[in-house]
Image: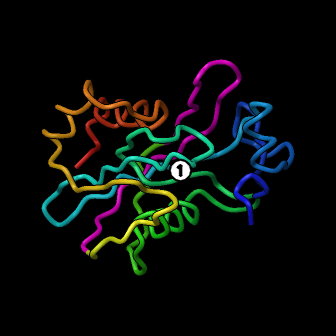
Amino acid sequence: MNPAEEILDVVDERDQVVGQAPRGRVYAEGLRHRCVFVQARDADGRIFVHRRTATKLVFPSLYDMFVGGVVGAGEGYDTAALREAEEELGVSGLPQPRFLFKFLYDGGGGRTWWSAVYEVRCDLPVSPQAEEVAWHAFLPEEELERRLPEWRWVPDGLAAYQRLRARGTGG
């Protein structure tokens, strides 16, 4: 299926479902929807960082310190977090990601979505999807911090990361 045809729940400011629409329409019309962000760390505590492919519908070719994506119609945040983490890391058998917090991301211009943030430990060898991930590495947090001003980051992932650091719930 073309990703633009995937059906998503449309939600209100309280994260209550008010309808459904194809992803392409949700993006084009700025309809509020749901996303998950999963911070994956390896056994050494390094964070999985990647650059999105140029073909992504949203934020192509930008860097991200989370794996994740949209929550499908009728899907729960927890289910989406595990599905997206396994898909993007190219693994199976991950433990259920641990929910940390949820916030309403507002990117301006009607670009707003509910964002559930999770963390998971990935001790498995990763094999990210070529259609999703152009480059990847597990980076020590200090290196990630050094790269923040140097690389172009997805704005919603950066907002989630800043909230995570402010809460002191990372690691």
Could you tell me which residue is drawn at 30 percent across and 31 percent down? 151
Could you tell me which residue is drawn at 80 percent across and 31 percent down? 29
Total numbered circles: 1
Residue wearing tag 1 = 36
The percent coordinates of residue 13 (x first, y second) are 71, 30
Image position of 29 with respect to 139: above or below: above
Image position of 119 with respect to 12: above or below: below
Could you tell me which residue is drawn at 45 percent across and 48 percent down? 52
The amino acid type of the residue labelled 1 equals Val
Image position of 126 with respect to 169: above or below: below
Could you tell me which residue is drawn at 22 percent across and 63 percent down? 42
Work out whether residue 68 or residue 98 is closer to the camera in this orientation and state it.
Answer: 68
Image position of 78 with respect to 36: above or below: below
Q: Is residue 160 left or right of residue 20?
A: left
In the picture, residue 67 is in which quadrant? bottom left
Indicate whether residue 119 is drawn in magenta.
Answer: yes
Q: Secondary structure at mark 1?
A: strand
Q: Is residue 13 left or right of residue 150?
A: right
Indicate whether residue 10 is drawn in magenta.
Answer: no
Task: Name the main secondary structure of what is drawn in magenta.
Answer: strand
Work out whether residue 20 or residue 116 is closer to the camera in this orientation and state it.
Answer: 20
In the picture, residue 79 is in which quadrant? bottom right
Q: How is the image coloured?
A: rainbow
The percent coordinates of residue 116 (x first, y second) are 52, 46
The percent coordinates of residue 44 (x first, y second) are 13, 61
| Magenta residue span | 102-123
Quadrant into which the N terminus falls: bottom right
Mark 1, other Cα within 10 Å: few <14 / some 14–19 / many ≥20 = many
| Residue lying farthest to the top in this orientation | 109
